[in-house]
Amino acid sequence: MSDPRPIGVFDSGVGGLTVLAEVRDRLPFEHTIYFGDTARVPYGVRDLSEVRGFAFEIIEYLTSLNVKLVVVACNTATAAALKASQERFEVPIIGVIEPGARAAVLDTRTRHVGVLATEGTVKSRAYARAVHYLDAGIEVCEQAAPAFVPLIEKGIVEGPELEAPAREYLGTFKERGVDAVILGCTHYPLISATINRLLGPEVRLISSAGQTALEVGRILSRRGYLRRPKHAEDFGRSTFVCSADPEEFAALGGRFLDEKIQAVAPAAVL
Ligand code: DGL
């Protein structure tokens, strides 16, 4: 049995492409549809109830395209809407917070874990809850980094404009003896070189993208939803949809995925 339906992946912008890249690496025969809500990015400064409404709309849209699974490739939307979405929709839906928390718990030696995330995710305390659910004694130090997403969406992933706020945000982790920092926003792996350099080699950065992709594979396999290719070259196709200018999205997204992509507005797909 082969299930050719696509996997739906969404984020407020280009950040979720870091998760998409891992999904495509691990599951190269799967078709994917990526939705970037570029008209409403950033999500991190909004009320969680507003973000929940956006997530419902996007999942509704993706299910109308017959996806077999939805990846909420956005921590803010995961914090705001994962549980409510799982109750509301029949399609399997997975988020990015629990996989990142698990990786950090396994990784830390000092038992001081840092979380760098949007204001919305930090306010939700979703990471602290997820870490403590696995290991209640771990210290969790959460830091909001509101300047990052607008810079990354402009394509600024290095240089002084990024470093000034980064120094301010990362200072807390150093003072608290943190040895593992969760990149609690899917945009942040795109600036991991700067974060890594400022934190130094003794602090490890944890991104949930790889763990999330593994989880996607496990769920598809358990449900018998994997696509079986007709031949070894029969790779999955990716479709990119965004809610603002498709050309801008294609230029930036293509740069981050390191390939030429074409993006369209939702109306072009429906
Ligand atoms: N990339 C998203 C996250 O993981 C959202 C960032 C934003 O839109 O503020 O939280």
Image (cartoon, rainbow, N blue to C red):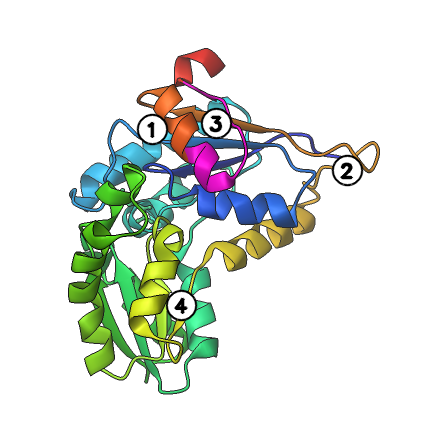
Residue type, mark 1 in image: Glu
* Sequence-first disc among 4 and 1: 1
Q: CA distance from mark 1 to mark 2?
A: 30 Å
* Sequence-first disc among 2 and 4: 4
Q: Nearer the viewer, mark 4 or mark 1?
A: 4
Considering the numbered disc 4 on the image, is that residue within a helix, a strand or a loop?
A: strand
Q: Is the residue marked by circle 3 packed among few (<14), some (14-19), or many (20+) residues within 10 Å? A: many
Position of 57 with respect to 166 (left or right) is right
Q: Residue at x 42, y 76 (%)?
A: 105
The residue that mark 1 highlights is 57
Q: Which image quadrant is residue 87 in?
A: top left
The residue that mark 4 highlights is 205
Q: Which mark is residue 201?
A: none
The residue that mark 2 highlights is 228
Q: CA distance from mark 4 to mark 3?
A: 28 Å
Question: Does the residue at mark 4 contact the one at mark 1 (Cβ under 8 Å)?
Answer: no
Considering the numbered disc 1 on the image, is that residue within a helix, a strand or a loop?
A: helix
Look at the picture and state if 269 lies above or below 28. Answer: above
The residue that mark 3 highlights is 240
